[in-house]
Image (tube, coloured by chain):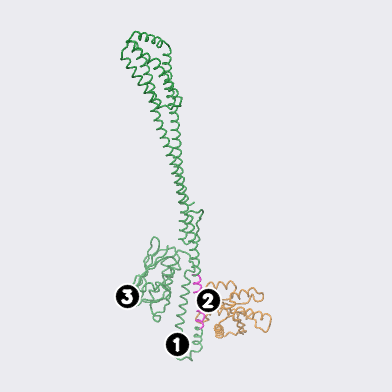
Amino acid sequence: MDKVINILMIEDDSLDVRDAQRTLDKMSVLYKMQVARNGEEALAYLREAGESASFMRPDIVLLDLNMPKMNGAEFLHAVRNSDQWKDLKIFVITTSDEKEDRQKVKDLGVSGYIVKPLKFNNPSSIDSFNLMIDIMNIKNRI
Amino acid sequence: MKISYFILFGFLLILVLFSITTWINFRQAERVNENNEFYSRSTTTVRNSNRFQRNILNMVSGLRGYLFTGENYFIQAYDSAARENENILRELSSLVPENSSQGKTLKEIQALNSRWINEFGEPLKNAKTLAGTSDSSLVAFNKLYREKLINPAERNINRALQAKFRDFANYEYDLREQRRQVLTESIAETRKISISLTTLSIVLGLAIAIYLALRISNRIMQMVKMADNIAAGNYESHAVSSGKDELSQLAQSLNHMSKVLSENISLLKRKNEELDQFAHIVSHDLKAPLRGIDNVVTWIEEDHLEELSPKVKEYIGLIRGRLVRSENLIKGILSYARVGREQPEKEMVDLSQLFVDVLENMPVRNGIQVRLPQKLPMVYTERIPLQQVLSNLIGNAIKYHDKAAGKITIDFSNEKTHYVFTVSDDGPGISNHYFEKIFMIFQTLNERDTIESTGVGLAIVKKILDDRKQTITLHSSPGQGATFTFTWPK
């Protein structure tokens, strides 16, 4: 029996949020999603979640790279340097398919790199997404 | 010091040295001339003194002959000798300076001579002439003859005269010898000075020439090297400019030029980088909203397909088509911006294999045949950009071919300094109006609805070749196919 997965999505484009939700729905994943519109908002949310039980603690983070105020790479830096969240599973979800961008976040320790758009006829994006789901399921089973 | 001043100064110095040499030699020539004059004067003096002595003898013997014989012949000899001696004394006193020791001697000689003539010569001669006229005169003559001629005074005067003249002549000989010695010494001196001054001039001239040659050529070579460096793209090159001469000014100008060049080049580089970055960012930012539209269209198609009327479905198809076109344009900008950002490494490339790779990625079009050269070598070159140029050219030839059956011919030749590739097709050809336009970005010759193209392919080809200072030429006319020929560095 699948457990509900708690997802923190850090994304400034609401359309992309809806896209992710739609994909998860189509894959029949049970999830709860909290959205932060940039890195700063996400960090603020994580601080609250660390202190109060009424806030959902994310099992996984979907992180966009290109955002205002605090971008994805800066957020990764901040998270990896905090004691509480340094082991958080983070998936980068971005439009950029550039080698440099992949390498940059890989060095910051991400669990997966998903290239938008999330299309079922775009195998690479969906494969990464499936991988993400797999990782979450494995975690759920434990 | 300025080089022109240095040369001027050097030559002036040499000129002065030569002038001194000439002046010394001229003075020496004057001295020799003077000596010649002295010598001829001296010869006259000696000759005159010899003649004088001889004349005295003649006078003595003439007088005595006359006294003994009374023959007029003797008195004539006496008279002419006496006359001649008067002349000689006059000439000698004009030749000899009055206050010199010789002048004094000459005066003494004159006095002795006058004394002899007045005391002995003339009285005896006159007495003898008168002796024949009367007995008293004869007595007087005989008396005078005994008094004067037997008297040793006459002989003494004579002897003194002879001695004086010997002295006079000897003095002249001594003087001549002294003058000769002085002249010899001064000639030797002059020669020494001339030789040393001439040698000094030659050495100085050589030294100036060598110094100039070294000083100029070294620095010119340095500046030539610098210019070569600049030509090779090293704009930081710097020439040392010590001193204040013309070459230093040139070096300073060169340095200034290279500085300005360097600044301009780095500015240009920065602008180019900015432009590349700009293209990169713009295309990413453009992508996001397009992808949004694409997402929404996808949702409509996937989730609400049954609710759509055929017209809406058609419109959605049109939106899709323009989305694809936009995406291709963005990809085009990105790949154009990416050219030159990476520095591909050289590697051994099997050209046959390269063409196989290129053709494998081409869209298949039945009836279009690609002909490769029989033998293709291995070359050491940058593979990725070469592959991109070839695949863009061949791709265009296939894509724009207007007939069902066609032929694309590839040629390759290995020149001394570079390779030459040729891609010819028998497609529609291009009017020469468009030869320049087709290499500009986003320029296409077909209406977008006929053939989907972004107009980036040839712009990329041109950029890759420009980056490597290579050329591409096009031979074509409408209906005659097109031949692209480009060079590739070795």
Q: Secondary structure at mark 1?
A: helix
The residue lying at 46 percent from left, 37 percent from top is B193
Q: Which residues are magenta?
A: B272-292
Rendered location of residue B473, percent (x, y): 37, 68
Please tell me the colour of chain A: orange
- Examine the structure image and report whether residue A1 is included in the region drawn in magenta: no
Mark-to-mark CA distance, 1 and 3: 37 Å
Rendered location of residue B112, percent (x, y): 42, 18
Q: Secondary structure at mark 2?
A: loop
Please tell me the colour of chain B: green
Task: State which quadrant residue B463 falls in.
Answer: bottom left
Local packing at callout 1 (Cα closer than 10 Å; few below 14, some 14-19, many 20+) is: few
Say yes or no: labels 1 and 3 on the same chain. Answer: yes
On residue B479, the disc is 3
Position of residue B55 relative to residue A85, above or below, is above
Residue type, label 3: Gly
Residue type, label 2: Ser
On the rendered structure, is B197 left or right of B409? Answer: right
Mark-to-mark CA distance, 1 and 2: 29 Å
Position of residue B36 relative to residue B302, above or below, is above
Rendered location of residue B479, percent (x, y): 32, 75
Identify the residue under disc 1.
B315
Q: Chain of mark 3?
A: B
Residue type, label 1: Tyr
Identify the residue under disc 2.
A96
